[in-house]
Amino acid sequence: MKRKLLLTTLTISIVAILALASHLYGQMSHDRLRKLLEERVAIQPGELSYVERQGIGTGVLEDVNAPYLTQSLRFNRRGPLGNFLAEISYVLALVSDERQAYRKSVFFAGSQLAPLGTPGIPEGTYSCFPIGMKSWVYTPPEGAKPGPGAGTARLVIHDGCLTLKVYVEYQPIDPKAKTGVFLPVTREDQERSEFVARLLLSRAHMLLMNWEGLGTLRVQSAKATVPAKRSTAGVIYVAAGAVLQQHGGSLKQGKAGVFTASWLGKRVTIPVAARVLLIGKQQVPLSQPVLYDGREVWIEARGFAQAFGWKLIRRGQAVSLSPQ
């Protein structure tokens, strides 16, 4: 029953997102979409403190006729012979057809050893918390030693009309050596790249939703009102941190873009850009992904209420959210 509910919820979500994507395609040129991706989705200079240099570009993936955003985020790592260059790079594409987006994601997750049209790396994420509708990840094995090919890691995500691949790549320890020897990608850099992936997907969904143009609601919670948004599909998003604060709870940011909400001893794991909330191994399905605007985490009100066992009451335009 729970699996059926999750599949139904995801189906509704996919239909809504694809409708929004089709609307964008119908209303905007590829040039305009590329500009919006660069302005509203890309990592901005100074946004990530460890990044020392960065480059950005946009284009169109000709095989799927999809505008894309690409960026490189460069920083230095300390090796046995001094500093070496490290880089997080990504390609994010907005595809009008969900099936094509999935096929492109599978292509991004391919390898020379995998049959054509099948992923060549395992499903998952570095943190083991979900992201998007499906994801694949490659990282050097635990305890890997420096050597050729050790300095790369890859995360690929499919999410409706969005496809995203994020690489971590290290330069050789000694760039003058005839055979390149690479340090294995650190856990910290894996988590950094996953945070980038979650942030990019969240921003892309906010672009698809026309987040800035959505009407602001005031949801009653305790004796105060908290910020909320209503999407064009009628989904109410609430600012999770603000809601929890009204009731003595807390919201803490962990690594890799995963937050933990606490209230009266109950803990809920909130992975940004995921379509579920987690209570231990239990999953609470969401019809829309978790969003993060850099300050606040936004969650579908229905899913928030279900995760914490609260009441969500809607009477016309009046909405209240509070413990039972």
Image: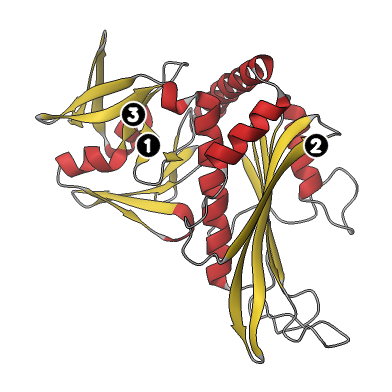
N-terminal-most mark, 3 or 2: 2
Q: Nearer the viewer, residue 101 or 56?
A: 56
Residue 225, percent from left and from top: 17, 28
**Is 6 on the left or on the right of 90, as rendered?**
left
Amino acid type at circle 1 is: Trp
Q: How is the image coloured?
A: secondary structure
Which residue shows up at 31% across the image and 22% down it? 216
Which of the 4 image quarters holds residue 298?
top left
Q: Quadrant of residue 186?
A: bottom right
Residue picked out by circle 1: 298
Instruction: Point out residue 93 in the picture as x, y percentages from the top left corner.
Output: 70, 38
Question: Looking at numbered disc 2 in the image, what kind of residue is underneath it?
Answer: Leu
The answer, for residue 245, to whether it is visible in the render is yes
Residue 140 vertical position relative to residue 57 in the rendered view, above or below: below
Above or below residue 29? Residue 204 is: below
Mark 2 lies on a secondary structure that is strand
Going by the image, does 50 lie left or right of 117? left
Determine which residue is flagged by label 2.
Answer: 61
At horizontal 22% and vertical 42% (from top left) the residue drawn is 244
Q: Is residue 259 left or right of residue 188?
A: left
As displayed, is residue 2 above or below residue 234? Answer: below
Residue density around tag 2, few if under 14, some if 14–19, many if 20 or more, within 10 Å: some
Tell me the SS state at disc 1: strand
Q: Callout 3, which amino acid? A: Ala
Circle 3 Cα neighbour tier, 10 Å, few/some/many (<14 / 14–19 / ≥20): many
Tags 3 and 1 in contact by the CB under 8 Å rule? no
